[in-house]
Amino acid sequence: QLADLHALRRGRLRLGVMTTAAYVAPEILGAFCAKYPGLEVALNVTNRDQLLERLTAQDDDLYVMGQPDESLLHDITATPFAPNPLVMVARSDHPLARERSIPLARLAEENLLLREPGSGVRAAVLKHFTAAGVTPNVRMQLGSTETIKHAIVGGLGISALSLHSLRLESSGGKLALLDVVGFPIIRRWHLVYSRGRDLSLAAKTFLDFAVASEPEIRGQLGEAMTAFERLRSSV
Ligand code: PGA
């Protein structure tokens, strides 16, 4: 017990998170580090494909990623964690911002902005369109969520984003959620590590801490949703 405390006081923790989780992990880490101030923490933010490479190379102690592929399941331990809903976003003066139950096919008429290949969000959005038999009109590929938000505000098109990435939105009501049938796309994060690796005490403690913070994360998502609903009813 005492040895454990000592280890937590001086240990290291290397976390690998997907970009969508990067909107949440620092806040969990803040609370975690307040409790274990001596821990040395590194947070590596990458897209899904790069995260899978890091996982295979065992570069980090623990990962926050989406649904792991079937083929990975016997090599890793995955604990389901907080929800990661993808919402369709437009500039708030977009005519679709006032419509209800927009069919996905209607979005084919819009310019769609997508993340780079290797992004889990990109893959999920394309899969959603394919499953519905709708061909999206991809206007542009952009390498980051923040750039996509600015491109939406700049009038370049619409895009699907993690609701987490809109939680602290400061663009002053310039973005609106679209009420598209089949959206939000509901996904969950997972806390993942290689089976072949002994989870360090710091990583194990963080895993438990993160799982315990799920209700708070859900609460934040609820608040984000309410903020956008308020915006919608004022249009
Ligand atoms: P990503 O994030 O798009 O940066 O890979 C992953 C996800 O939420 O699936």
Image (tube, helix red, strand yellow):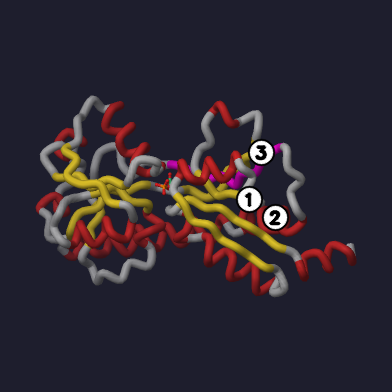
Query: Mark 3 packing: few (<14 Cα in 10 Å), some, or many (20+)?
Result: some
Eyeballing the image, is 84 above or below 22? above
Eyeballing the image, is 192 above or below 235? above
Query: Mark 1 packing: few (<14 Cα in 10 Å), some, or many (20+)?
Result: many
Q: Main secondary structure of the magenta part?
A: strand
Residue type at the position of mark 2: Ala
Eyeballing the image, is 181 above or below 214? above
Per the image, the residue denoted by label 2 is: 203
In front here: 116 or 121? Answer: 116
Residue type at the position of mark 1: Leu
Give the quadrant of the C terminus.
Answer: bottom left
Query: Mark 2 packing: few (<14 Cα in 10 Å), some, or many (20+)?
Result: many
Q: Residue at x 62, y 49 (%)?
A: 59
Q: Are marks 3 and 2 in contact (CB under 8 Å)?
A: no
Per the image, the residue denoted by label 1 is: 62
Distance from disc 3 to disc 2, alpha carbons, whole Å, reads: 13 Å
Q: Are marks 1 and 2 in contact (CB under 8 Å)?
A: yes
Query: Which stretch appears magenta?
Result: 187-195
Who comes first in sequence, dot 1 or dot 2? 1
Per the image, the residue denoted by label 3 is: 77
Q: Residue at x 65, y 36 (%)?
A: 76
Who comes first in sequence, dot 3 or dot 2? 3
Numbered disc 3: secondary structure: strand
Who comes first in sequence, dot 1 or dot 3? 1
In front here: 18 or 82? Answer: 18
Residue type at the position of mark 3: Thr
Q: Residue at x 53, y 41 (%)?
A: 53
